[in-house]
Image (tube, grey):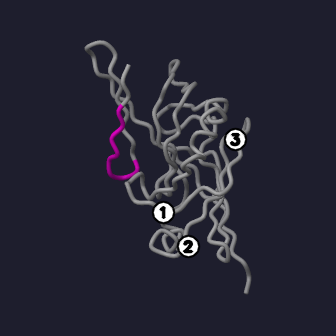
Amino acid sequence: MGLTNVLAPRGVLFLWFKEGSMDKKFKKDIFIPIQKVDDEQHMVYGWASTPDIDSDGEIIKAEALQKALPEYMKFPTIREMHQAKVAGTTKQADASDKGLYIGAYIPVGDAWQKVKEGLYRGFSIGGNVLKRVGNVIQDIELVEISLVDVPANKAAVVEIWKRDK
């Protein structure tokens, strides 16, 4: 079985896998709001994924995220809207039963400005589904995490923190 992914506009990652002579297409777009912004360190914190049902009607098991995290951290890319544009890097990551919580460093630039202005309100994961049972993703290859604007998984509450001056 061969896996292919194609990045499309508006924060959507399309996934195809070939099984025999029949192609099947899957869309994976998971969004969790940003939890905290640290102006001084240019760090953004929040859930990258949780085991809650998203707007596509899918659930990613926490165990799948725990398994995928070590490989992702070899190249911990943060992108903008799932495009091939680097926005930063994941500096901290914790995969637990609650999901994947990250701290991402976003340097000065357009992406940082969009976070500060509230245009990028959360994270969305992109990757390849390796095993699915019904609507439950049980194994995933986590390829990237993006800053995005529109929620699909609304399990977390937006909470922005800025240092008082």
Q: Secondary structure at mark 3?
A: strand
Label 3 to label 2: alpha-carbon separation: 26 Å
Image coords of residue 149 (percent x, y): 47, 58
Q: Residue furthest top?
A: 20
Image coords of residue 9 (percent x, y): 32, 51
Q: Secondary structure at mark 2?
A: helix
Classify residue 100 by image quadrant: top right
Left or right, 53 with reference to 7:
right
From the image, tell me which residue sits under label 2: 116
From the image, tell me which residue sits under label 3: 95
Query: Can you tell which mark lies on residue 87?
Result: 1
Q: Which tag, 3 or 2, sits closer to the chain's start?
A: 3
Q: Which amino acid, by three-letter code, is at mark 3?
A: Ala
Label 2 to label 1: alpha-carbon separation: 14 Å
Name the residue rendered at 47%, 38% in the picture: 127
Give, as a single range, the part of the protein colored magenta.
4-11
